Structures are given as C-alpha cells and as structure tokens.
Image: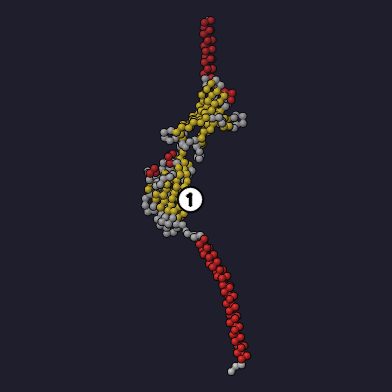
Amino acid sequence: MAPHGITFLRLTGWTWKIVLALIACNHLALMWPFFFAVGCNAKIENQFKLQSAPVLRERGVTLTELRVPTSVMASIKNGVVLDCLYTLRPNSIGLVVAWYFNNSARPVYQWIPGQKPLSIGVFRHRANLDYKVSDDNDTMHRALHIINPTIELSGDYRCVVSTYHDEDFMIKRMIVYSPEKKFDVYQKRVNNDTIRVTCMVSGVYPVPRLTLFNNSVTDKQSYPLVHSRVDINRLKDTSYEVIISVLISDDDITTQSTLDCELKIPDTPYVKRKTFVFFQDPNAASNTYSTIFYAVAFYWVFKLVAY
C-alpha cells in the first residue's frame, strides 16, 4: 500500500495538469472571437473583391470606323459611298447591317449575309444594291452606295451592326450641297451722289454666306463692307436665293475701284468670287458722245449756211 504522501503528490500532479488545461482553454476561448473576426473579415473582403471585379466579355461585333464624307456635291457622277467597318468575333451568328437616315425608325438600307440587300423609303431606287465593298461573305454589302445624291439627302447617317449577342453603332452627318445656278453683281444709282451695288445668287443649297469686299488699289487688300443688307428667300425646289446690297457714295469711288462678291457654302469646300468694276455714271459715256455729235453737226451746218 502506497504511502499517503506519494498519493498526495500524484493527485497534486494530476490536479495541476487539469488546472493548466483549464487555463489554456480559458485563453483559447478569449482569443477565439479575434480569430473568428479576422477570418470573417477576410472572407467578406474576398467576396467584395470578387463582386466588384469587372466581368470582361468579348463583344460579338465591334464597329471600328464610319466613313461618311462631311459634304458631297449634288448629282455627282459616280455617286457617294458610305462605309461601315466592323470586326466580328469568330463563330458569331445573326449578323445584320442596317443604315438609318436622320430619325427614321426603320432602316433605309439593310443587309443580312446570304441575302440580297434591301433599300426602303426615300432610298428606294437610290441605293445601288449590287455594290460590293469586298468579296468577304461577312462584309461584302456593308456599304451604302447612293447613286444620285440630292439636297434632300443631307442629314445624319447611322450605321447599326448587330448579332444575336450584341450590337454597335456610329453616327455621322453629311451635307449634299448644290452650287448656284445664277450669280450676278450689278449697280443702280439711288440719287445724284449714291449708288447701290447688289450681289445676287439663286438655286444654291444650303443657305450660302455672301460677303462684299472693297478692293484697295494702293495696298492690294480686300476689306469686307460691314453695312450690308442681306435678304434670304426659299425657292420652290427647296434651294435658296440670297441677295446682299450696299450703298456707296460717289466720293468713295475712283476710276480703278473694284468690288468682290464672295460666295461660300458653309461646311463645304465650295468658294466662289465675282469681281465688279465701278463706274460713277452709267450714262456718262453716252452723254459725252451725244455732246460731241451735236457739236460737230452744228459746226457743219453753220459752215454750209455761211458758204
């Protein structure tokens, strides 16, 4: 039988083990919320990063360039081509190329690969449906070829390219301009010391900008005349007549005075000038010749009578 002292020591050893285990559990319990909180925060942060990261998806079609001229002359011989360049993702299906004019809800031109292009509305019989921009089955009829552009076709052109997955579009404006059919500069006497010089253009589209310039002989420069009157009239064929006039005193006119009338069509490269040479009295030459004639006639009559 073991002595009581040895039993006490053994019990005491086990007791200390239990006490130490309890202390360790207590510390672990105290530290557990910290570890749990850190783990939860890390999990939430990772979830937030996953949710906020952008999802990159390759587009089925991307429009890269819209080739529409800013201006074109009406009735140009070979017409005008409006091209719509795009890239397709491999194996894309459901391709449709459509052109819209201004705010039209329906396309004025549409092409689906494997089918013949269609022209609708105002572009019916104006679009060349046989025109091919390439031999590629996915791009050959993408372009709109306008055979006979006229002034009513000025406006915004929108190309929409779509597939079953998504679509893309671009818009550009084109002006179809018409040069003038008539361009005149003339003068009319208002009173004894003032004349009115008038510049008139008609049959032009869109509304042109007219400017009168007084040409200086001494420094060889042109100066715009600021006190000018401008009248604009809309004609039946939707073109315009524009008249600009200015009053000029005889004191400002010399024998070498000239005036230029400049015609500009806005947003186009079209510019034209016409030069006008001043003369102080339209009847001056005829009056001079009449005076000489009568003087010579009177002289010969007097000679005959005296003889």
Q: Quadrant of the N terminus?
A: bottom right
Residue shown at the point (52%, 20%) measured from the top left: 283
Q: Could you say where residue 209 lies in the image, as x and y percent from the top left?
A: 51, 35
Could you say which is closer to the camera, residue 21 or residue 278? Answer: 21
Query: Label 1: how many residues lie within 10 Å, few (<14), some (14-19) or many (20+)?
Result: few
Residue at (52, 17) in percent of width and height: 287
Q: Residue at x 45, y 45 (%)?
A: 157
Please tell me whether residue 298 is drawn above or below residue 34 in the rendered image.
Answer: above
At x 38%, y 49%, the residue is 117
Which residue is outermost to the bottom? 1
Above or below residue 75? Residue 29 is: below
Q: Position of residue 293 (x, y in %)?
A: 52, 14
Q: Residue 156 at what x, y percent from top left?
A: 45, 44
Depth order, front residue of 82/189: 189
Name the residue that disc number 1 marks.
65
**Count of numbered tags:** 1
Looking at the rendered structure, the secondary structure element under dot 1 is: strand
